Amino acid sequence: MLPFRLYLRLSGFYLCYFAVLGVMLPYWGLYLLALGFDPARIGELLAIPQATKLFAPTLWGWWADRTGKRLWVIRLACLAAALAFTGVYAVGGSYLGLVLVTLLFSFFWNAALPQFEAVTLNHLGERIHDYSRVRLWGSVGFVGAAVGVGFLVEDWGVGIVPALLLALFAALWLISLLIPDAPAGVVIHPSLPLGRVLRQPAVIAFFAASFLNQAAHGPYYGFFSLYLETFGYSRELIGLLWGLGVAVEVGLFVWFPPLLLRLGSRQLTLIALALATLRWLLIGHCAGNLPVLLFAQTLHAFSFGVVHAVSIHLIHEFFPGTLQGRGQALYSSLSFGAGNAVGSLTAGYLWQGLGPAAMFDLAAVLGALAWLTAWRGLRP
């Protein structure tokens, strides 16, 4: 697939990047709760990194496409994110201080992944169906962080979370220095005007479905750990439950290339979005039943893993040549940015007003709408 040394470096970046998420998603909300913030404030702080995805990836993607210095953008973004995150120690428990620090570090951090996706695809060349076998190490990093930090938090408390995140940000920058650029001439496809691509019905349907699916994940990413604590689950078990979903995702990434070749992107997307809708209903109404909750967590392989892998494949088709950086950035902005921000904010207010079950009922509705959008718009 790739030279082994290159494979290790590309995989290492994904491993480290998603290890950050493996700490942040399960435990940052618990850290903020320990600082004394209520669910509405936590939802607002968790929404900020998603909100910066509305503009940061597109801005950085435009710069990378225009200058051709994609790796330089990635390295600068990783270094600036690490430096900005040190501000967490300066602001302490100040809400406004955390707002400013979160805005700053996420503005840089959100720039790195879309451009790195383009670098990876350029290295893969015509073998883009092997993307999932590189990306699976991101899932391994998430699992290791989510499970391992659960035990650390139980022994040392949530005060250790900022230090772990800062160490991972620094490691991400160091790894970025080892990544070589793609060989000249890998991307040779002519580019259509961006506006013409964005007006295509299939592209519109793709972005709409991506937004709705990621908005449905908002309650999960922001409040799953807090929700499980209300049932008396320990933090070690909560970490294991986060890790279970992504561990199954790793196995699916291994088998994704033949699945994609056999079923096609549209069929895989519809199956994944239907299972995502089921997942939110089970979590919302059966979280106290551990066997059902375990099954619901295995569906993360579809609600995120399959949808994301197919999306990367479609972005590579929709946005060829010099549009790759902006295509990846738009996908990040509209789905992980706008979608997760809307989902996290809404979940924070629903938790206080209507309760956790209502959060996940809304997620199921959004998942069903994503399925309907993909069914109508993503034609073969």
Image: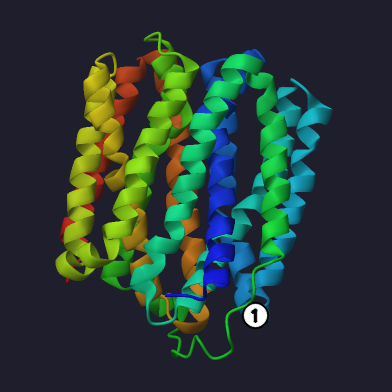
Quarter holding the C terminus is bottom left
49 and 19: which is toward the camera: 19
User: At which x and y percent is residue 85?
Assistant: 74, 40
Question: Which residue is located at x 44 percent, y 47 percent?
Answer: 139
Callout 1 environment at 10 Å: few (<14), some (14 to 19), or many (20+)?
Answer: few
Question: Which residue is located at x 30 percent, y 33 percent?
Answer: 297
Residue 244 is at least partly visible in this image: yes
Task: Indicate whether 297 appears above or below 213.
Answer: above
Q: Is residue 377 left or right of residue 34?
A: left
Task: Indicate whether 271 appears above or below 156.
Answer: below
User: At which x and y percent is residue 52?
Assistant: 60, 48
Question: Which residue is located at x 58 percent, y 85 percent?
Answer: 183
142 and 378: which is toward the camera: 142
Residue 205 is at least partly visible in this image: no
Q: Is residue 188 left or right of residue 376?
A: right
Q: What amino acid is found at the position of numbered circle 1 in the picture?
A: Gly
Extreme residue in the front direction: 4
Q: Which residue is mark 1?
A: 68
236 and 230: which is toward the camera: 236
100 and 175: which is toward the camera: 175
Extreme residue in the right direction: 90
User: At which x and y percent is residue 61?
Assistant: 59, 68
Question: Which residue is located at x 74 percent, y 20 percent?
Answer: 93
Task: Indicate whether 189 appears above or below 99.
Answer: below
Tag 1 secondary structure = loop
Q: Is residue 108 left or right of residue 267?
A: right
> Would you identify the image quadrant in which residue 28 lies?
top right
User: At which x and y percent is residue 262?
Assistant: 16, 68
> Would you identify the image quadrant in which residue 102 lies?
top right
Quarter holding the N terminus is bottom left
